[in-house]
Image (tube, rainbow, N blue to C red):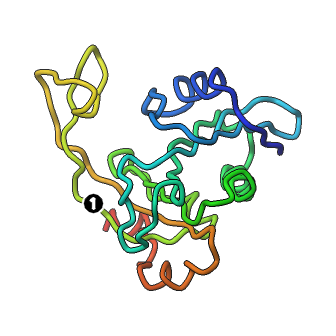
């Protein structure tokens, strides 16, 4: 498996074809194209600035010191997704030398538990009940910031994960850490 910096064209194609949201995230910072051992393009892994600069208030980190994993948009031909994510995490350390912390979310509405984060040793720190409403517009469910339609539903919420790039943050991450959510526990 090989990763290299992604073009916007690769990001657009992958997000629109391989990710369930069918949207390119705003605030892109660094993205990597993923190629399998046969050198076949498999999609992208995208990091960007968090929507809120105080996304992890416990760390009091300034802008540029925290990035959010915004998309893992792959076509399943890469083999092990967690391996691709792990390689991207090593690359981002080199490409963003001032980076101290990664943050990401798994979507409860998509029945995601953060399996790839668990496989790459991220810390699970919180779970939200809801992150607002989404509306049905032109045949798609969109977050309220993207438009309003006649039909709406409450969003299911997110599971929040963090990963310390700076080894000095490991202790703090461990104090915030909670047991990983598991599918069996949720269904029971």
Q: Where is residue 170 in the image (x, y as percent from the top left)?
A: 57, 80
Check the image and name the residue furthest to the top. Answer: 138
Q: Position of residue 85 (x, y in %)?
A: 67, 52
For residue 184, above or below residue 38: below
Could you tell whether 80 is left or right of 1 in the image? Answer: left
Q: Position of residue 75 (x, y in %)?
A: 65, 33
Residue at (56% x, 61% y) in the render = 117
The residue carrying pointer 1 sits among few (fewer than 14), some (14 to 19) or many (20 or more) residues within 10 Å by Cα, namely few
Could you tell whether 42 is left or right of 159 in the image? Answer: right
Check the image and name the residue furthest to the left. Answer: 150
- Image quarter of residue 167: bottom right
Check the image and name the residue furthest to the right. Answer: 38
SS state under label 1? loop
Query: Nearest the camera: 7 or 185?
Result: 7
For residue 17, above or below residue 110: above
- Quarter of the N terminus within the rendering: top right
Residue at (17% x, 43% y) in the render = 154
- Image quarter of residue 93: bottom right
Query: Nearest the camera: 118 or 188?
Result: 118
- Image quarter of residue 144: top left
Residue at (58% x, 57% y) in the render = 116
Give the residue at mark 1.
128
Could you tell whether 108 is left or right of 19 in the image? Answer: left
């Amino acid at each position: 498996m090989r990763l290299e910096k992604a073009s916007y064209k690769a990001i657009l194609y992958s997000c629109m074809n391989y990710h369930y949201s069918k949207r390119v995230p705003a605030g892109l910072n660094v993205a990597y194209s993923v190629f399998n051992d046969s050198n076949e393009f498999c999609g992208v892994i995208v990091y960007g600035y968090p929507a809120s600069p105080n996304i992890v208030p416990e760390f009091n980190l300034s802008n540029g010191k925290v990035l959010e994993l915004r998309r893992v948009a792959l076509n399943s031909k890469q083999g092990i997704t967690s391996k691709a994510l792990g390689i991207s995490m090593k690359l981002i350390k080199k490409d963003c030398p001032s980076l101290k912390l990664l943050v990401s979310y798994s979507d409860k509405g998509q029945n995601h538990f953060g399996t790839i984060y668990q496989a790459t040793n991220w810390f699970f720190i919180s779970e939200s009940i809801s992150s607002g409403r989404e509306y049905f517009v032109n045949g798609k469910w969109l977050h309220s910031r993207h438009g309003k339609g006649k039909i709406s539903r409450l969003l299911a919420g997110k599971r929040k994960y963090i990963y310390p790039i700076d080894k000095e943050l490991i202790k703090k991450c461990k104090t915030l850490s909670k047991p990983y959510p598991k599918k069996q526990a949720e269904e029971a």
